[in-house]
Amino acid sequence: MKMYINEIWKDIHNYEGLYQISNLGRVKSLAKQWRSGNNGVTLRYHKDKILRQQNHSGYLEVKLCNNGNKYSAKVHRLVCQAFLPNPENKPEVNHKDGNPTNNHDSNLEWCTHDENMQHAKRIGLTLKGIEHPSSQLTNSQVYRLKMISKNIEINYGYWTRISRSLNVSVGSIRDAQRNKTYKHIQP
């Protein structure tokens, strides 16, 4: 197993003796031995093993198992719970550099949802319009929708026809028209 300078390992809460997390964001399954086979005669053993981390929606997570119960755990939360005190009981974890795969303890901090959103906005992580991954409309489509609704009274049937022609939901059209989304586009 490759060793890293200044890597510190601590037990994962509720998985003591089974798994550990490091201050660098690595997770390992601890060495264990067990009996297997029909009558439990065969003795099996495995050494400490670094777990493979999966990228789930941009965040790294690992699968932990205890008494047959499996659990997916976000690595950044495990690091914070083990290494960073949370005296104010803040519910979220912020990546200071904005990189959700950098789970070193020095890059993480406890925060509120508002603090997390303000930080994302401050460092330019919030995406608008077509840059946002869930965007369904182009900026020019939204501009035309807002111009139309500004100049004439629109009924539900009209929005339904537009939504079908653009292949998006009526709710997406209505939210854009009412400035709930695409606020940066003004006619």
Image (tube, helix red, strand yellow):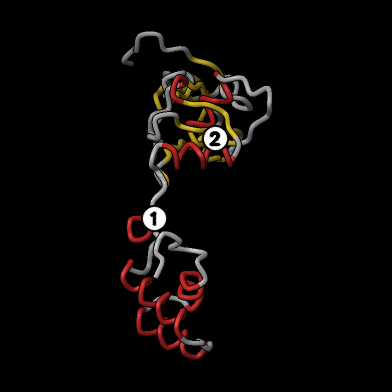
- Seen from the viewer's position, the closer of residues 95 and 4 is 95
- Seen from the viewer's position, the closer of residues 147 and 157 is 147
**The N terminus lies in quadrant:** top left
Q: Quadrant of residue 59?
A: top left
Q: Nearer the viewer, mark 1 or mark 2?
A: 1
Dot 1, crowdedness within 10 Å: few (<14), some or many (≥20)? some
Residue 94 in the image: above or below residue 158: above
Q: Regarding mark 1 in the picture, which secondary structure is present there?
A: loop
Task: Report the residue at 40% width, 37% height from top.
Answer: 123
Q: Position of residue 25 (x, y in %)?
A: 43, 24
Q: Regarding mark 2 in the picture, which secondary structure is present there?
A: strand
Q: Quadrant of residue 84?
A: top right
Q: Position of residue 72 (x, y in %)?
A: 52, 40
User: Is the C-beta separation of discs 1 and 2 under 8 Å?
Assistant: no
Task: Report the residue at 45% width, 31% height from top.
Answer: 95
Q: Is residue 69 left or right of residue 161?
A: right
Q: Which residue is mark 2?
A: 65
Dot 2, crowdedness within 10 Å: few (<14), some or many (≥20)? few
Q: Amino acid at mark 1?
A: Lys
For the residues labelled 1 and 2, the Cα–Cα distance comes to 39 Å
Q: Position of residue 74 (x, y in %)?
A: 50, 36
Please report whichever mark, 1 or 2, sits nearer to the chain's N-terminal start: 2
Q: Is residue 171 left or right of residue 24?
A: right
Q: Which residue is mark 1?
A: 128
Q: Position of residue 133 (x, y in %)?
A: 37, 56
Q: Amino acid at mark 2?
A: Cys
**The C terminus lies in quadrant:** bottom left
Residue reaching furthest right? 88
Task: Report the residue at 58% width, 38% height from top.
Answer: 68
Task: Report the residue at 50% width, 86% height from top.
Answer: 154
